Amino acid sequence: MATQQISSALRAPAPSRPYRQARTGYGKRSAPDQRPAAPDDFALLPERERYVAGYVDHLPDGAAMDIKSLAKDLPLYGQMAIGTALRALAVAGHLRHVRCRVETLGQSRWVTRTYWSRTARDNEWWQAHLAGEADAPPGPPSAPSVAACPPAVPQQRTTTGPAPDGAPSPAYVALARLGRVDPRLGLSAGDCAALERLASEWFARGVDADYLTRALTCGLPDRIGSPVGFVRRRLTDKIPARLPDTSAPAAPDKPARRLLVECAECGHPGPADALPDGLCRPCRADSPAVATARGGDTEAGPPAERDVHALVGSLRNLMRTP
């Protein structure tokens, strides 16, 4: 039996210029209670994932962690490879992508954060930590809360009135911009008009153009023969659930805090306990890394029974394609 050798190749580069900073409220958020940094922190990960993890681990809080920024700073890999590496790191327990609703100066907005842990964490730890973050006031990351409370969901819009003066609707504009985000999804004016009603149903369920764009452009195949057919399918299959109107004024001494975990593969949001390993149910079912970590079983065991180190080790030979 061959002895596994831990490679030290491709160490994360030390940047020669300041880190890219994310917009205020976005970017990296370090998890608490991590062990001190050591040379073998990510030794069990495949080469690419170890390289990306080493770089991300040295980023300060608030640094940009989107795929495009990391691809610019790590020229050895393109955007697709970086996206695959981040997904593998989520499965391994090192990160979670989170959409968080914050209140600043009387205005409410959604921001996207990436919570990072040098120490690989299991699903129960992440659920407890993110539950505490959902109730914590704005500021530095807090320690995980002992009592887990369910994260709130986005408030559903009650009206979606027509655009004034014949201007294109938000749904039409979001569809028209897809080709600017990714040329593989370039739509004609007729395509946008044909899909406008489907996209409007997303807006009627409380999402915004940024969320719609992310849901339609995450995890694209290399080639798309029919952009209009592909977008129609995603608009139909990935439409968010219709939520009951539970709007209620927040207590003056405790402003509402809302937090949803994003699927590391497709960007679909949900409560932390509904996205084990940072993946939604459909993406989790299709993930070879998760399937191998289960040892071939068709049913995943409870999060507490899963071995984080075994899961990390299973990624070595599975995450080699971009």
Image: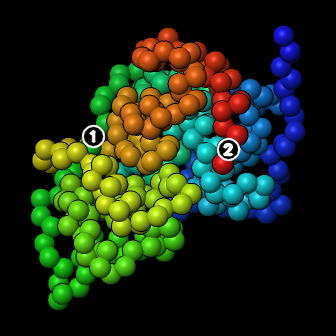
Among numbered discs 2 and 1, the one appearing first in the sequence: 1
Query: Which class describes the residues within 10 Å of circle 2: few (<14), some (14-19), or many (20+)?
Result: few
Q: Which mark is residue 321?
A: 2
**Badge 2 vs badge 1, beta-carbon distance below 8 Å:** no
Check the image and tell me how it is coloured. rainbow
User: Closer to us: mark 2 or mark 1?
Assistant: 2
- Of residues 67 and 195, which is closer to you in this image? 195
> Which quadrant of the view contains residue 204?
bottom left
Image side of residue 271 versus residue 3, left or right? left
> What amino acid does circle 1 point to?
Ala
Residue 152 badge: 1
Q: Residues within 10 Å of mark 1 (few under 14, many from 20)?
A: some
Q: Quadrant of residue 2?
A: top right
Q: Vertical placement of 289 versus 184: above or below? A: above
- Compared to residue 208, the image places residue 320 above or below, namely above
- For the residue pair 172 and 133, the one nearer the viewer reads as 172
Residue 141, above or below 44:
below
SS state under label 1? loop
The residue sitting at the front extreme is 225
Q: Position of residue 94 (x, y in %)?
A: 60, 33
- Residue depicted at 44% across the width and 73% down the height: 186
Residue 304 at x, y = what percent? 48, 13
Q: How many angstroms separate mark 2 from mark 1 (CA)?
A: 37 Å
Q: Is residue 5 above or below residue 177?
A: above
User: Whole-percent x and y of residue 98?
Assistant: 45, 45
Q: Residue at x 74, y 34 (%)?
A: 46
Number of marks: 2
